[in-house]
Image (tube, rainbow, N blue to C red):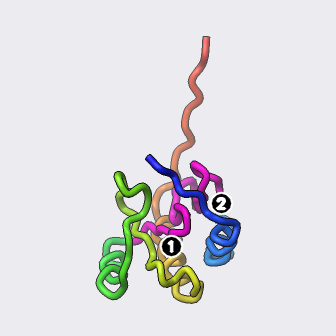
């Protein structure tokens, strides 16, 4: 499976569309980036593509009005996420409201429980 690497400009663009909220945590993921709230990912960067986890209604609205794309590896796109239109890569103003909707959607979920550390004996 080929993992595309985002450019520094892609990473900067991704960070620029994230909500300015103290609960937003950005972490590296497989050479890309993920944005989390309460331990749950609400947006990610896969190569140049920003993916968001929207409510079903918001996802349906986005997909009906814009040319979205799968998010993640072509062979196994991430379920529950939709890739924002490629044309928006140069227009943060179009991406920002959808990333904010994803944040609101995921922030309403229960916090993700931390993984228990297994003992190595």
- Name which residue lies at 66% across and 67% down: 11
Magenta span main SS: strand
How far separated are the C-alphas under marks 2 and 1? 16 Å
- Is residue 65 positioned above or below 83 on the image? below
- Name which residue lies at 61% across and 52% down: 31
- The kind of secondary structure element at disc 2 is strand
Q: In x, y percent, where is residue 51?
A: 47, 67
Task: Give the crowd class for mark 1: few <14, some 14-19, many >=20 residues within 10 Å.
Answer: some
According to the picture, the residue beneath numbered tag 1 turns out to be: 104
Q: In x, y percent, where is residue 121?
A: 61, 10
Q: In x, y percent, where is residue 24?
A: 64, 65
Comparing 78 with 2, the one in front is 2
Q: Quadrant of residue 25?
A: bottom right
- Is residue 6 positioned above or below 69 on the image? above
- Is residue 92 positioned above or below 24 on the image? below
Q: Which residues are magenta?
A: 26-54
- Name which residue lies at 36% across and 85% down: 66
Q: Is residue 53 left or right of residue 60?
A: right
Comparing 111 with 11, the one in front is 11
């Amino acid at each position: 499976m080929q993992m595309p690497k985002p450019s520094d400009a892609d990473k900067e663009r991704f960070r620029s569309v994230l909500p300015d909220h103290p609960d937003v945590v950005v972490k590296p993921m497989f050479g890309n980036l993920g944005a989390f709230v309460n331990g749950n990912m609400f947006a990610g960067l896969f190569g140049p593509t920003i993916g968001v986890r929207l409510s079903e209604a918001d996802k349906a609205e986005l997909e009906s009005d814009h040319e979205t794309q799968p998010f993640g590896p072509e062979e196994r796109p991430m379920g529950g996420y939709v890739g924002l239109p490629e044309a928006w890569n140069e227009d943060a103003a179009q991406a920002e409201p959808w990333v904010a909707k994803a944040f609101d959607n995921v922030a309403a979920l229960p916090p993700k429980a931390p993984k228990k550390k297994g003992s190595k004996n």
